[in-house]
Image (cartoon, rainbow, N blue to C red):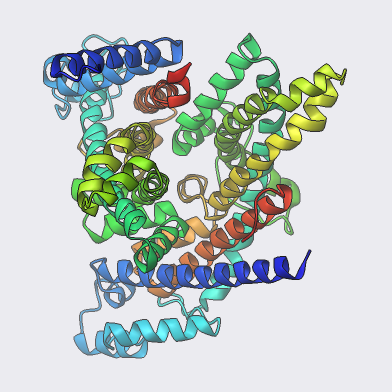
Amino acid sequence: MTRANLVRTARFLGRRMLGLLLVMWLVATLVFVILRLIPGDPVQIISGIDVVDPAVLDELRAELGLDEPLLVQYLRWLAKLATGDLGVSIRSQTPVTELIGKALPVTLELALFAFLIGLLISVPAGAAASRRKGKLTDALITSSALVGISLPSYVLALVAIYWFAVKWQLLPSGGYVSPTVDLLENLRMMILPAVTLGLITAGTLVRMLRRNLIDQLGEDYVRSARARGAGENLVFYGHVMRNALIPYVTIAGIEAGILLSGAVITESIFAIPGLGRLMVTNIYDRDYPVVQGAVFVVAGMYVLVNFLVDLLYSWLDPRVSLS
Amino acid sequence: MIDTSPATAAGRDQSGFRLFLGRLLATPAGWIGTVITALVILLAISAPFVAPSEPLKIVPTDLLKPPGSPGHLFGADELGRDVLSRVIYGSRISLVVAGLSIGLAILTGVALGTSAGVAGGWWDYLVMRLMDALLAFPLLVLAIAISVALGRGVFGLVLAIAAVNMPVFTRLTRAQTLQLKERPFITATTAMGASALYKVWRHVIPNLLNALIVQATTATSFAIIIEAGLSFLGLGIQAPAPSWGVMIADAKTYMLVAPHLLFVPSSALFITVLGLNLLGDALSDALDPRMLEK
């Protein structure tokens, strides 16, 4: 890399990092504003409807800093964020980082399994469909992929629970056990939610990969390679697949980012204590610090994954310049 | 000499439309998608005439009747309400909420995207970072928070779904605007002193239409999924209104004894989304300029 290139890359990275910081500040501001728009007093919700003494409620409000003007609360939240302090849950008085620390590995595990299922299905299925374009195999794979993207996760989850948990009683209908406590039970409990999410991810990825492969198969370099006598498998796996995988990596990265955001409905249906469920239950409870902290972490992961995908993309495809 | 008389232009428009329709219906995916979507819209409009009974009518003697029972082709629910009628009326809620929210997302997305593309500079930077922030925000959490903040109901639901869809339209519009800005016919109108608003209205938006139509179709199917999902979680349309999401949520309790309560609204939702996705794919091919040239 020449010195000029190095400077250009460093400048690009600096600009991107600045952009990321701005995006994260906007996310922090957005979540703060939206939560404050939700009607309902967190102190009253936590205290329960039987506590009506205004003095008690005021005292609690002052203790939690909720009696201060919104601008002060906002600036305090930003100042704490800058030091990595996500605050303390209003309801449980547990540090938010601790709550996220418990929920994050669960979401990561579910996301990882679902993503692997998506990859394991989409690569061979996309390859088979593109190599037999217009044939029965292609029609079956593209139809299945379309079904995958048209099935809402909650429908697929409930139908899976109906057959596999209720009717045939092969798998548990929900719940979560840590892999450190009981690995086998953990895997049994993860099958239905991971497959549910994985099939939907696979649907998107298959369609994308098939389209890329078909585009690549029509390129001149494929015709040249064939004319030079290169075998079909060498052309396909050695050239076509490698080129088609470049844009596939981008979409796969975006899908991974979405999975990491916490599958809110899937986690709710299968009673999985991940980040999605943490955010939703605490919106109901008006536990501002927990929702703010969890949203900030989830958005941060999404932004980071996208940034890494961008870097990976320019590394995989030298024609894409970082600057 | 080139004839630009209105009659010829109209004829050209007509033949262009016929060509587009021919392309749209040329593949099985295209006509299946068109037929499903048209049928769902027709059912939603004519619900009072085609539904066998009132969607909220409780019949205590018909509780959990299975499909095929007299008067209940798709069975009855836990209150003896006709499932088919509720599914037909449910299509109205799905389409109205999805239509309004995508309409709103397009209006705001096009306004923000074109202004960012035309103005450039700090406005462009700010708008795009705001869209990045909205995209980074966990989608359903954003929808849930807005829906809870604005009260559970159609208004909150429409705004929530519009907010999660707006960034896609903004990005799409901005990208197309930037491309068009460099085209000779736009630079020519700039040289002739046309205002930015005139250029956007007269040239940019008409050129965006194809991409917007394709994106709107896909976004509508997505909006229907989110509407039913929020209603499923109890955050959108509230019972006893016959939203597909509400029906699926209610079905959980009776899954073992009355699986039709799960399968009928789920199938309606799936078929509608499938139809829109097929139509979106076919529209994308039919409106693709590269395909039109072939």
> Taking B209 as reference, is B15 above or below it?
above
Q: Quadrant of the N terminus of chain A?
A: bottom right
Quarter residue A187 falls in: top right
Q: Residue furthest front?
A: B1
Q: Position of residue B59 (x, y in %)?
A: 17, 24
Residue drawn 26% across the image and 23% down it: B83
Which percent across, then down, holds residue B146? 29, 58
Is A12 or B199 nearer to us in this picture? Answer: B199
Q: Is residue A24 at least partly visible in the picture? A: yes
Where residue A248 sits in the image (x, y, percent)?
Answer: 64, 40
- At a point 57% along the width and 38% down the height, the residue shown is A201
Residue B80 seen anywhere in this rendered image of the structure: no
Direction from residue A146 to residue B242 in the image, left or right: left
Q: Nearer the viewer, residue A221 or A232?
A: A221
Q: Is residue B241 left or right of residue A113?
A: left
Which quadrant would residue A197 be assigned to in this image? Answer: top right
Q: Quadrant of the C terminus of chain A?
A: bottom right
